[in-house]
Each structure stands twice: as C-alpha cells, then as structure tokens.
Image: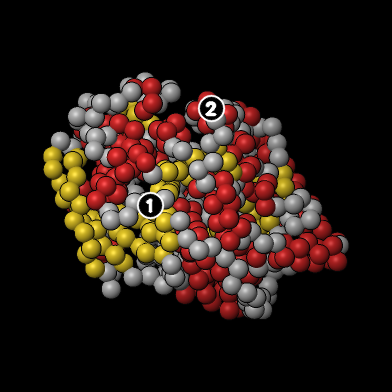
Amino acid sequence: MLIWMAAAENDTLPGGKVGGVGDVMRDLPAALAREGHEVCVFTPAYGRFHQLPGSCKVASIPLEFGGRRRMAAMYRVTTDQAGVTTYVIEHGLITAGQPGKIYFDDGPEEPFASDSTRFAFFSAAIAAWLEQAEQAPDVLHAHDWHLGPLFLLRRFGKGLAKLRKTRCVFSIHNLAYQGIRPLKGHHSSLHAWFPDLKYTKKKVVDPRYRDCINLMAIPIRLADGINTVSPGYAREILRPSNPVRGFIGGEGLEDDLSQAKAEGRLSGILNGCVYPGPGGRRPGWKSLLQAVAEVPGLLPGGTHQRMQKLSRRRPRSVLVSIGRITGQKTTLFLQPVDKQQTALEAILQHLGNDGLFIMLGSGDRDMERQLGDVAEQFENFLFLRGYAESLSHLLYRAGDLFLMPSSFEPCGISQMLAMRDGQPCVVHAVGGLRDTIRDGVTGFQFRGRSQRAQARQFVDTVASALAVKQDDPPRWRKICERAAEQRFTWEAAARQYGQKLYANS
C-alpha cells in the first residue's frame, strides 16, 4: 500500500517530539515500510524543520483558509528511514511567530486557540495536496485531534473528490485533549477557518458544549476506521469518566466511541517498542551520579549537597520514575493516603535511608513545586526537574524498580523501556499498563475504587515489591528476567494496523 501519515509530531526530526505521538511517528512508519508498504509522513514545519540540512522544496500548495487564498510550501526532509519519505509543510500561520514551537499554552480562558488554527491550516493543506498529487494514497492515517479538521473537510468540503475516495483512518492517542473551539464568534473558530463551509451540526459539535466544535469527536464520527494505542484503553473509553471513583474513560465522547465500536470501526492496537539488543552492564553508581551532575539545568537548589552524600555507596534499592509532570502521571504520587502523608511521602518513609527514589521530569509548575518541597524534606528523594534522553537511558538500566502510577494510560512507553532493561515496574492497572505488565510475573499492578484507595494500594504494592526484592532474591531475579524477555514489537503492531485499520473490509 501507499500510506500517508499526518501528525503534529515526528521524532525523526530533531526537536520534533513532545509526547507519545512523536514516538509513534518515528517507529510505526519504519515498521510499515519493513512490511513492504510505501509510507509518506507529513508534519508541520513550525518555521524550522524545512531548514534542516538536505531539505528541499517540492511543491507549493494553493488552498482556501480563513476566507482567503493561501499558498503553503511543502519540503522533503532527509531522514535515515528506509522506505519512508518525510515531508514538512510551512506557512506563517503554522509558525505563528514562534519558530520551532509545536504546541502553545493559551491558558484556561482560551484552550487550544492558537494550536487549533495552526492545525486546521495544516489539515487543509494536506487535503489540498492530496487532490493535486500524482498518486493518491491507498490509506490516509491521521493522528489525534490535531487532524480533526481533515475529516471535516473530507465530509463537507468542496472539490475534494480524491480525498473522499481515499480510506481515511484515525488514531486516538489521548482523549484528555480534544481541541474544543467555538463554532463561530472568535478568531479561532470553525467559521473563522472555513467561513463558507456548509456542514451538518450534529457531526461536528461537542456533546457537552453545543456551540462548540470538537476536533477529536469529528474523526471518531466520520473516519473509516479508528484505533486507540492499546486494547485496554479501547475498552475503558467506552465508559464515562468518574473522577470520584478514580476512573478516566471516554471523557464525554463515550457515546460516539460506543457507536463506532458497534459499527465495527473501533479497535485497540498496542504501541510497540524498539529492541536494539543487550544494553550492556548496569551503570556504575558513581558514573550515574556524574551523568546526573553533568546535565545542565536539572538540579534544583540544594541537590548538589545531596549528591555529595549519595556518592559514597549505591543504596540498597533504587526506585525510578521518568515522565511528564502532569495530572495524568503525577496525581497519585501527591494524593493523600492519610491526614499527614501523600503516597509519595509514605513510599519514601517506607524506603528509608538505605534506599533512593530518583524522579526525572518536568511539566505542571504547581506539581513541580510540590515535588520540590518533598525533596527538601526527604533526603532519599532526588527530584531532577527537566529531561535528558541520555540520562533517562542510564536510569532505565540502573534502577531496581520503576514507578508508573498513571491515573489513566492510553499505552505508555516508559514501562516498556524499563522492562526492556530488566527493571520491573509498579503500575496502575489501567489501559496499556494493564496490557503490558503481568502482576507478580513481569511486574506489579495495583487498583482501587477511588483516588485515595488507588494511592493507598500504590504505597502497599511498592512495599510488597521491595519485600520480594529483599526477602526472596531468586523470585526477584526471575521477575527481572521475565520483564526483560517481554517483546512488544512495532512489527507486530504494523501487521495489526494492516489487518484491523487499513483493510477496507
């Protein structure tokens, strides 16, 4: 097949990744190419990627946007992926005056205002290019809410006959972000983007805010096929979210998703992981600490003195967590388990002075502050605010137990990377975490019927896992070995995409 993929991120481009979408766009196209498909990947240039060495302009794309005739520029970018051709689309509306910035934070008063306009233009450019391309794709595969306008144009736009004949499929990466904007009356609204578009309101509106468009809901309603990035998440999103019970499900779109399921359009396909071969010996303790110290900007005030104390010997147990500091990933760490302690504080108290918990990540400022406050109180907690790819690789190899208590998790990659290096994980039994970890066999799961119950069970499960490590070394070694043996390959995922999503039947 000739497969076109379009997404907001692409980790084959330097600085082209913010989250899991970037990982998928790096690895899935290459796996599809190895299966014999021809793959073209399209990403916004963001005022930067079209300037990469070896890039060349291949087309100008005329399109209508905002009531005016525009001209987008498309560039082919050189990558090392065999069988994959990478394109980026550039225009001032995409750059929006901030070259290199993938997502804007417009704040709670105008969520998605800047990004939705940029991605609506990107979607319109993809639609226009398909009409003038010499060969239309067999499949157009769009990722997340950013490409929602593409399905809007496919159904209601004029002069898009080739697009309508092309099988168009859609991947949901995270329902927490839906791109909700007004239908009209704002510079970032459906009417502002496509003022002459005649559409059926029920196909585009948000189910809760009837004067708004929902860019995630549109492809769920209109795509030929839909997948989420794990079978577990595909089941969970058919039920309404219930924050009081600590359950995150369809986030208001469960009725649309259930309809898609009933029509045979919804499936769950687990993301993959790259397995490059043995990672070598576990990093020495002093070399790990040196790597931490050498990464600029990671160490908050006071941590250097902590590092001096830690350098004397490796703690008996090293806990690790790597990821974005967000409500999804961090809430259960900071959830109170009693009047005096959060789950994180209870874990640190149990870990004691002969253990260490290293957390690497950045994101929500308030949560960063709370984690920093805990780090000041507990000498066995090292909070490294920021991110460094080289350091994360060392931590996956150096840790004894990886903690991933996500409130929900469409798929997750960190648990796969930790397991790949023989580090068992403690995970919340949701979404892709439940699909990839076997409790007591390759790692440890916890549950709970409220956030407090989940936090309490999280603490107890970490304690139980450490007890296995300390009191039953043969069983612990077996769990580590089984974790390292697990394989969640992109080749297997690519075959499922071909069978479940790309096939017309």
- How many other residues sit within 10 Å of disc 2, few (<14), some (14-19) or many (≥20)? some
Quadrant holding the C terminus: top right
Tag 2: residue type?
Gln
Q: Is residue 380 visible?
A: no
For the point 29% across and 40% down, which residue is it? 161
- How many other residues sit within 10 Å of disc 1, few (<14), some (14-19) or many (≥20)? many
For the point 29% across and 65% down, which residue is it? 76
Disc ID at residue 151 = none
Q: Is residue 103 above or below residue 178?
A: below
Disc ID at residue 259 = 2
For the point 27% across and 69% down, which residue is it? 55
Quadrant holding the N terminus: bottom left
Tag 1: residue type?
Pro
Q: Is residue 167 left or right of residue 341?
A: left
Q: Is residue 120 above or below residue 280?
A: above
Q: Is residue 489 visible?
A: yes
Depth check: 176 or 357 in front? 176
In the figure, residue 79 lies in which quadrant? Answer: bottom left
Q: Is residue 386 left or right of residue 63?
A: right
Q: Is residue 420 above or below residue 162?
A: below
* Dot 1 or dot 2, earlier in sequence: 1
Q: Which residue is mark 1?
A: 137
In the figure, residue 354 lies in which quadrant? Answer: bottom right
The figure's colour scheme reads: secondary structure
